[in-house]
Amino acid sequence: MLSIDGSFLDFKQLDLLALRQTPVHRLDPRAKVLTTLCFIVCVVSFDRYQISAMLPFMIYPAVLMAVGDLPFGYILRKIIIVIPFALLIGLFNPVFDRQVLMQIGSLDIWGGWISCFSILIRAILTASAAIILVAITGFPAICEALEKLKMPQTFAVQLLFLYRYIFVLTDEGVRTARARQLRTFGNRGLGIRHFGSLVGHLLLRTWERAERIHMAMLARGFTGEVHSSRRPSHFGRTEVLFMAGWITLFILLRLFNAPQFLGGLFTGTMP
Amino acid sequence: MSHHIVHVKNLQHVYPDQTVALQEVSFLIHHGESVGIIGANGAGKSTLLLHLNGYLAATSGEIIIGDDTLSKETLPEIRRTVGMVFQDPEDQLFMPTVFDDVAFGPLNMGLSHEEIEARVTEALERVDAEELRNKPPYHLSGGEKKRVAIATVLSMLPEILVLDEPTNGLDPHARRQLIALLQAFHHTRIVTSHDLDMILELCDRTIVLHEGLVMADGPTMEIFGNDELLKTCRLEKPFAMQSCPVCSPGKQTSPKQPPLVAPHSSKPHDHHHDH
């Protein structure tokens, strides 16, 4: 089983991937953020029983992964972490939605099964797009792009700090949990009551750290605004082409069910 | 700008819960001096440091840095003059990459991109961390973090460096490296630490705090030579000044401990010390 410890350490790898130099890494972050956003909106806006029409969307993560020279196995492992959450959402669909939509031989396929499967595919598509976006752009650059796209700076700074300190905080949390575990000898300790004070301590520690960080910021002349040190990136013709190309494709794929259309060409029956 | 003095006059600080952290502290530090501030836990060292760049406001007394008395108006200038390096570098490095972090101060000062670039490069070269510039802070080792944390204040060209426990948590090699680095600086330096050997090497002058009072203020060697003073203030001589357990086992601080090597051993041992 993947431990939290391990999977967070792994996120550092994502940062290193973002330092690579490939054509997609070099694109202006804004283009990548907007394209990914458009991709996600198209995917989630499908009808809940839709499966086949979503499959061609796989092309976007696949192409980026290939051009961005990303390790497939690593990205796959990141996606697998997300899947249980998606399954949890779709879990009860087959119980409540027993409308028969399809029959394979004598086997009835309920609508619930199809919608559950549809949720799963959506999760895989959107999670992979988001993870790949971070891997080819880098989290700080994404925050900066969002800020340039008129997101309030406060949110951008919040996100940056979250990303910076999530490792420190998980470290602290893991150490606390380990200290507790070592003294409970495999029992549950004092159960939930104990857990409350543990989490409370973690909160207080976080609070203190926030105070110290603020102190360090003030000591260096912080006045409420975080200035960007990066040179302005260029939104040029490549970016426009990248966005226009992908977004047109997404809209076409969203409006026309490509697999059905292709199938129709071969069998000669149009829906 | 030649006289960057730090003048603390009758400083008192009482925390909101009525704890008296500083009863009365006064001292004058001249330009280019390197001063160690030592004392037991709870002696008021950290509280004192937090006053030096105006994070805490004095209950009474005043602080003069250069020509300015610390007040709301002079705060920005004083924060630029006094470079504060905190104990935990994790708190000081909050930006996504080392470069961003070192550039944070200069950016707040409103410098141009070219100037910032130059300052960051210079500060990182100064601490021997040029190759780390694009790394995120959590990819650094403890010693690297500490050096980068120092670079983040160097880039603001401070005249006075205040360091809280700089050698805390460093391995012997990283500690050595850091001491050598700090020795090379010409800034006025104020260092607090429990690492008294480091103070001995780095500071000519030492101020001893005890329960919010200045117990002693003078040449470091003199202070560490005063056994009685150290004992009252819950301190101990630096190891470099204690007798060597091998060559003079009789004069050890804890006489019950057996000597590491039998004194009547037939073969004379090779052993050096460099104090």
Image (tube, rainbow, N blue to C red):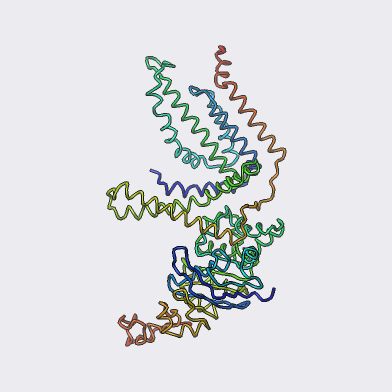
Image quarter where the N terminus of chain B lies is: bottom right
**Among all residues in the image, which is located at the extreme top?**
A269
Classify B72 as above or below B207.
Answer: above
Q: List x then y, in percent, for residue A254.
A: 58, 24
Residue depicted at x 54% and y 50%: A161
Q: List x then y, in percent, for residue A90.
A: 42, 29
- Please identify the quarter of the rendering in which residue A56 is found: top right
Residue depicted at x 51% and y 49%: A12
> In the depicted view, which residue is nearer to us: A92 or B23?
B23
Residue depicted at x 53% and y 40%: A131
> In the depicted view, which residue is nearer to us: B40 or A87?
B40
Classify B242 as above or below B152.
Answer: below
Classify B271 as above or below A78.
Answer: below
Q: Is residue B165 visible?
A: no
> In the depicted view, which residue is nearer to us: A162 or A72?
A162
Q: Number of callouts in the render?
A: 0
Q: List x then y, in percent, for residue A195.
A: 35, 49
Residue depicted at x 59% and y 35%: A37
